Each structure stands twice: as structure tokens, then as C-alpha cells.
Amino acid sequence: MQFALLIYHSPEEFVMRENDYSHPHLGAWRSYYKALVEAGVYVSGNALEVPETATTVRLREGKRRVQDGPYAETKEQLGGFIILELPSIDAALEWAARCPGASIGAVEVRPLSPETLRRGFTG
Amino acid sequence: MSDRNQDEMHRSVGRTIERVARESYGRLVAYLSVHTHDLASAEDALSEALVSALETWPQNGLPTNPEAWLLTAARRSLIDVIRHQRVVVGAEPTLVLLKENSMEPASSTAFPDERLKLLFVCAHPSIDPAMHTPLMLQSVLGLDAARIAHAFLVQPKTMGQRLFRAKTKIRDGGIPFEIPEERDLPERLDAVLEAVYAAFGIGWDDMFGIDQRGRDLAEEAVWLARFLVQFMPDEAEVQGLLALMLHCEARRSARRAREGRYIPLSEQDPKQWSLLLIEEAEHHLAAAAKHGRSGRFQLEAAIQSVHAERARSGHTDWAAIALFYRQLIQISPTLGIKVGYAAAFAEAQGAEAGLAILDSIASDAVSHYQPYWAVRAHLLQFVGKAHAATQAYDRAIGLAEDPAIREFLLRKRG
């Protein structure tokens, strides 16, 4: 069963991520990815550009509404995601707790829709 | 009464309820459920009693015996609940029993302490072992499901459901509320001790010393072990478990530098250890040894005792520690003990010897086990295999949950 770890960064973590490649926190991230791969649970994932680069589109009453920036104006913003193949939510929460992002931001764990439901979307 | 006096009164009543609830919760739940086998109803009834105490005590003043007051109130609401259930399950005998009991004078010395039975129920072999500790924390110590869920890293809703299922099984599954017979006692007691130690382990790992929540859980476990020693003074392993936990507690503050940096045992300053706790641990370990029955917890306590000896002698007898680990492997060959053995053997006989033991552990068992990779990395670095050491450090760092340990490993990796 697959789970998404949605990683929410504080503004400080976005800054650190962009500017300081040698910061120990990024070292921890690299080790975390290696551990996921070595444990055979990593499916895919990526980091997202800073929230300022986001553009949000809505269609309301036939009119396009384009907003500069992310959908929600909260302090912590989506900074990346990881898809994992794991036997249970318990295992997913364990990996979320080990995620370096959990100790300064937040990690949201969500099961991916089951294959049958996904086909309903994607054909 | 002035507003200020009334405020003060409310606060004082609030504190009393908190204290009574903490000290009496398990006693009352155990007593209320020992005949009905219905933990959930007993807990609900007690919660209701606590709520009505919060409502009435500030107005009417504190009762002379708060615990007896709570028992009477809880029993009344329990009888109501059972009356409602009676139509469905025919709870007539239980009802009669509760009523008979309610005729007894309810002073705190008059009702028997049934908590020991409750501990054995919580760790009964027909209950999922993963639920033994959560059940104890809730039923004996009164922790709420949300707090237990945090400690066990599951959703509060999920923990609530798992606790409910376990209690249903206790109620309907014919699990006896009694101290096991001599024949079954060692095995059944072992399950109880395991569950207490698991609570301690969570409190210990959980951001040691920094996170109040984690520290509380370790304290609760020590409280349970003290309780067990008091009620089962002749069980060597009970004394062993208490000794083990006290030795660990003695080093709590030494594990972190002022700024939160992690300090491994070998670099800790023994002057920061609590000599008082070490002394108490040694007392229990010696008492355990008098029974002439060795066991897992006594051996683990003995290992900690050797470490504590450094406070006096200035050095650590690693050969003795390795020997205790070897005996431990005979009775409890867990991953943690094997890795502990490898680390101790490396200190006594050299890094290569320790690595050979690590190599003998099945690789699929260690893929998620952080301490294995940390020890492996340390030993590889020591023998000059820099590349392999870096890789092992990466695994350990990636598997670390505690940020302070993660930073420690990052520094060591270089």
C-alpha cells in the first residue's frame, strides 16, 4: 500500500534549503533519502520550489481567477512530497517521525487512493 | 465569600481532585471492574464521578474521604449503566453483586487493592502484546487515549479504537481477574514486566530529558515497578526491572549538554549521575540476587551496574559487560541485545571482533534498526574503513528520530 508524506516547511527551512547546501539539516535529508532507498520503501518524491513561485488558478462562474502565490496563506507551506510503499499506516508514521522535516516543520501522512479509485480518475 | 476566596477555593478543590484522581484512579477502576470484567464501563463511571466532584465539591466543600466519595458516586453510575444493559445481556448477577458491595462501608482502607490483578489482565496472553502497555497506562494510571497515542505514534482515534477492542475482549473473552497460579506465574509476570519496561523505553527514547511527555512516561513506569516490588517482594525479576530503570534514571540529566547536545554514555561525566538513585538501584539488584534466580531484567540491570561503577573506579569493565550480554542472548536473543553485545565485545576485544558479531546478524532484520548502523559506523570508522563507515552513518542518520542523536551522528560522520 502506498502513502504520501507531504512535507510542510517553515519559511526558515525554505531559506536554508535554497542557500546553505552544507547545512547539517540538508545532510540529514540526504541520509534520510538514502535510508528510505536502502530499506526498499521509496517509490518517488521531489522537493517543490519556494511558495513564492506558486500560481493558483480557479475557474469561477466562467471566469478565470489567477492568484499569485499558494492556495493557503499559512506559515507552513508544502515544500515537497515522498511516496512510499509500506505495509501499514503504523510504518508510515514511523518513517514520518524519522523525517528531518518533522523536527522543524510538519509531515502529513496520507494513504494514496487505491488502484481502482485511481483508475476512475485517470482512465 | 469574596470572589477571590472563591477562586482560591476552586483552585484548591481542582488540585485535590487531580491528586485523588492520580492516586486512586487505578485502585478504583480495578475495584469497580474486578467482578464485572468491564473496564470501559468502570472508567466511564469513574470519569462521571470525577466530573460531578468538580461540580459539587467547590460548593459543598471537600468530603472527609474523597476516595470513598468517588467510589460511591462511580458505583451509582455504574449500576445505572448496567441497569440499561440488563435487558440486552442479563446483568442481574452483576447488579446484585455491585449492590451488595455498595453496602460495605467505603473508606479507602476498607476496599481491597485489586490493581495487581488488573495488571495481569492488561498483559494477558490473549490480548495483543502491542496493547499491553497502552491498556496499563490507561486503566491503571488513568492516562487518556490521546496522550498514549502520541507516545505510541498512532492516531488518537486509532488508539481509542484499539483500546476499546482490547477492553471488549477483556469483558467478553473470559479473561480471569486474578493473580496467576504458581505454575503460570513466571511467564505471566514476564508479560507484565515487559509491558512496564516498554512504557519506560518510550519515555526514555522520546526526546530524552527535553520532552516533558516522554519523561512522564518513564516516571509512570518506575511508579509501576515500585508498586510491583511492594506487592511481589519475593520476585527477583521485579526487583531486577526496578533496578534497571533506576540505573537509567540516575543518568538522565547527564545525557544532554546544557544546549541540548546528545552525550553518549561513554562521554558522560559520572559527577552528573544521581548517586542516590544508583544506590537505590544497587539495593534492589542485591535484593534480587538473594533469590538465586537470574533473569533478563537482572542481567540488564547488572550491565547498568557495571557502567555505574565508573563513578567510583574511573573505568568501565567491558569484559564483564560482554559476559552479561552473552548470558542475556541465551535467554532473550533480541536485536537490541545482540547489538549491545557486539558493542561491548568490541570494547573488550577490539573493533574487528565486534564487527564480526554484527556481520552474523541477519541483514533483513537490521534494515530499520538505527542502533545497529550507529554501532557499525563507529566500529568501521575505528578500523579505518572510511567509505563503509560513511555509508553506515548515513543509514543511522536516516533512521534517527531524535534530532539531537541525528546531529550527534552527523558530527561523527564528518
Image (cartoon, coloured by chain):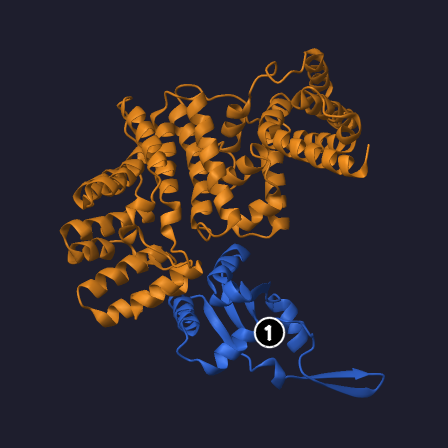
Chain colours: A blue, B orange
The percent coordinates of residue B340 (x first, y second) are 28, 48
Q: Residue at x 61, y 44 (%)?
A: B145
Closer to the camera in the image, B183 or B157: B157
Which quadrant: the N terminus of chain B?
top right
The percent coordinates of residue B147 (x first, y second) are 58, 46
Which of the 4 quarters of the picture holds residue A48?
bottom right
Q: Which residue is mark 1?
A: A78
Which of the 4 quarters of the picture holds residue B43?
top right
Q: Is residue B341 left or right of residue A13?
A: left
Q: Is residue B358 left or right of residue B157?
A: left
Q: Is residue B382 above or below residue B119?
A: below
Which of the 4 quarters of the picture holds residue B11?
top right
Q: Residue at x 52, y 55 (%)?
A: A90
Which quadrant: the C terminus of chain B?
bottom left
The local secondary structure at tag 1 comes to: strand
Q: Is residue B17 above or below residue B413?
A: above
Q: Looking at the image, which residue sits at the far left?
A: B349
Closer to the camera in the image, B86 or B5: B5
Q: Is residue B29 left or right of residue B343?
A: right
Q: Amino acid at mark 1?
A: Leu
The percent coordinates of residue B18 (x first, y second) are 64, 34
In the rendered image, is residue B176 in sight? Answer: no
Q: Residue at x 22, y 64 (%)?
A: B380
Density class for disc 1 (Cα within 10 Å; few <14, some 14-19, many ≥20) is: many
Closer to the camera in the image, A6 or B127: A6
